[in-house]
Image (spheres, rainbow, N blue to C red):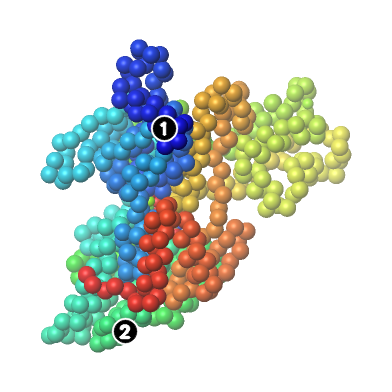
Amino acid sequence: FNGSKGHIAHADAVASNDDRRIASSEQVPKKKKVVLLGTGWGGMSFLKSLNNPNYEVQVVSPRNFFVFTPLLPSVTCGKVEARSIVEPIRNIIRKKNVNISYSEAECVKIDPNNKKIYCRATIDSHSKGEEVFAVDYDYLIIAVGAQVNTFNTPGVMENCHFLKEIDDAQKIRKNVIDSFEKASLPNLSDEERKKILHFVVVGGGPTGVEFAAELHDFVNEDVVKLYPNVQDLVKITLLEATDHILNMFDKRITNFAEQKFGRDGIDVKLGSMVTGINENEISTKVRGNGEKTSTPYGMVLWSTGIGPRPLIKEFMKQIGQGNRRALATDEWLRVEGFGNIYALGDCATVNQRKVMEDISEIFRKADKDNSGTLTVKEFQEIIDDICERYPQVELYLKNKQVRNMVDLLKEAKGDAAKESMELNIEEFKSALSEVDSQMKNLPATAQVANQQGAYLAKCFNRMEECEKNPEGPPRFRGTGRHRFHPFRYRHLGQFAPLGGEQTAAQLPGDWVSIGHSEQWLWYSVYASKQVSWRTRALVVSDWIRRFIFGRDTSG
Ligand code: FAD
Ligand code: MG
Ligand code: MG
Ligand code: MG
Ligand code: MG
């Protein structure tokens, strides 16, 4: 310890020992208590960026480690070891100058009126259900993620694998290897072997596609050497309910992926809806002609999307958000209607404000002289505020290739536009009528959760400073200004590994490229995004090990 750091650490320890006694006897203000739910991407990112020692933070999560989810598909076939992509949460919090404690428990109920949550310890499965305890908060941060969505398809829960948690990936790995061992036993008919080695992936999103590619590589690179007698009986089927796989990517990537999978012998069935699964067969219906088929399978991975956790569903009902798919927050990530509850990541969605909803307020504020019309000068004075408060405006101008908003107004006014032009409210409305068209919901990705966690930590780091010295973007509804800038997502691009050391990359500006060098970009990006040097070293050495020795197939 150097002097000052040691001093802070000591002060923290004292404060946490007995806050109340100190608060009353020595007039040290009691630290505000922040309770954080979840140790995934959102929670980890918040903890890593928080450095304001004036908070006392309690983390509640049933998982005492962070999982680097983008590498989960690599774990399913042994390219990377499970331990290499997890980081104990206690490693993350012990490095902070902030007073952070952790409880291995899940939150089962949120009581916003009494600023309390109820939790159940998840450590010992025998005592499950008994160890319920309450935790008070001043600020609550909800980052519990989402759960798999079966769309109530019969048999899915009982018969399918999922790929969401580290246990899932390990189970899949064991099951894949078991399948090859089982199919290699004597006294089986070829029919039986084929059934065992029929791998079905439901859902053509990034996770399903990457798993199919991993499995295909595994068969091509390792199975041919280790199980040469059964390699020809392997079949991989990818079922997608819509018209294309990798819908969220550029058309060029979708086409390339579908063609590559075709060449690889992965059977991609588009427009194919799963209607049910029993122990032996998976039943599908073709969209359009309604044709039904049932096919024997050995293993199914279900990866069709996510839905809200029971805790979130219950909370939404409680606070009148009804039957939504995620908790609605404002652009400051505050749950709508609450100043002290925040939500981020997969369990939440940001309700961006529309310009057109506030258009009359904007006009009234801009029209300083109350003349009922806006001059260019009046308008120019609030342009920056508008762009700041409504990020979609900038996007709209860029897409329309309009230099600035004044040009937009001139356009709306037609030929008569001069510097001296004035707009009435109707003309103002029509000029801006399209600006909201560019708004999109943010995707449920690690990238979003990660940026939101860092943003929220920054807000907490500056909370007192901002309370004394309010600044930030304007509110067009009500009065005054917000203390902080709204959250803004910066899309850094997206990868889709397609197997055979080829990856598709879609970078900002819709820059698309596919090939082997993109795979190297993928390796370097995912190495650099690791949350610690420890996991970075483990992941990179796993990759090298696999290049030299192939995959580990014990299990
Ligand atoms: P999570 O990371 O899911 O964390 C939720 C946390 O809350 C967990 O710690 C959980 O244990 C805890 N929790 C659950 N219930 C409770 C409760 N009741 N009380 C307290 N705590 C609770 N995104 C990308 O951007 N790029 C990728 O390449 C990518 N690949 C992916 C691959 C796979 C296989 C998967 C499954 C996801 C992938 N994602 C990727 C998506 C990304 O992982 C999620 O968007 C991200 O994890 C969301 O972060 P989160 O913090 O909201 O939730
Ligand atoms: Mg989280
Ligand atoms: Mg996670
Ligand atoms: Mg979200
Ligand atoms: Mg005026």
SS for callout 1: helix
* Residue 525 appears left or right of 118: right
- The earlier-in-sequence mark between 1 and 2 is 1
Alpha-carbon distance for marks 1 and 2?
59 Å
The residue that label 1 is drawn on is 6
**Does residue 213 sit above or below 537 in this rendering?**
below
Q: Can residue 208 be seen in this view?
A: no
Name the residue: 16% across, 44% down.
124
The image shows residue 276 at horizontal and vertical percentages of 26, 63
Residue at image point 16% right, 46% down: 125
Label 2: which secondary element: helix
**Residue 69, x across and y down, in percent:** 38, 56
Viewer-nearest of discs 1 and 2: 1
Q: In this view, does 447 lie to the left or right of 101?
A: right
Q: What residue type is labelled 1?
A: Gly
Q: What is the crowding at mark 2: few (fewer than 14 residues within 10 Å), some, or many (at least 20)? A: some
Location of residue 517 (image quadrant): bottom right
Considering every residue shown, the one lying at the far top of the view is: 25
In front of the other: 400 or 79 = 79
Label of residue 429 in the image:
none
- Residue of label 2: 224
Q: Residue at x 65, y 43 (%)?
A: 393
Q: Residue at 40% x, 69% y: name it.
A: 543
Horizontal and vertical percent position of residue 454 = 49, 42
Residue 107 screen position, x and y as percent: 28, 37
Quarter of the rendering occupied by the C terminus = bottom left
Q: Which amino acid does label 2 sit on?
A: Val
Q: How crowded is mark 1: few (under 14 residues within 10 Å), some or many (20 or more)?
A: few
Name of the residue lying farthest toward the bottom: 229
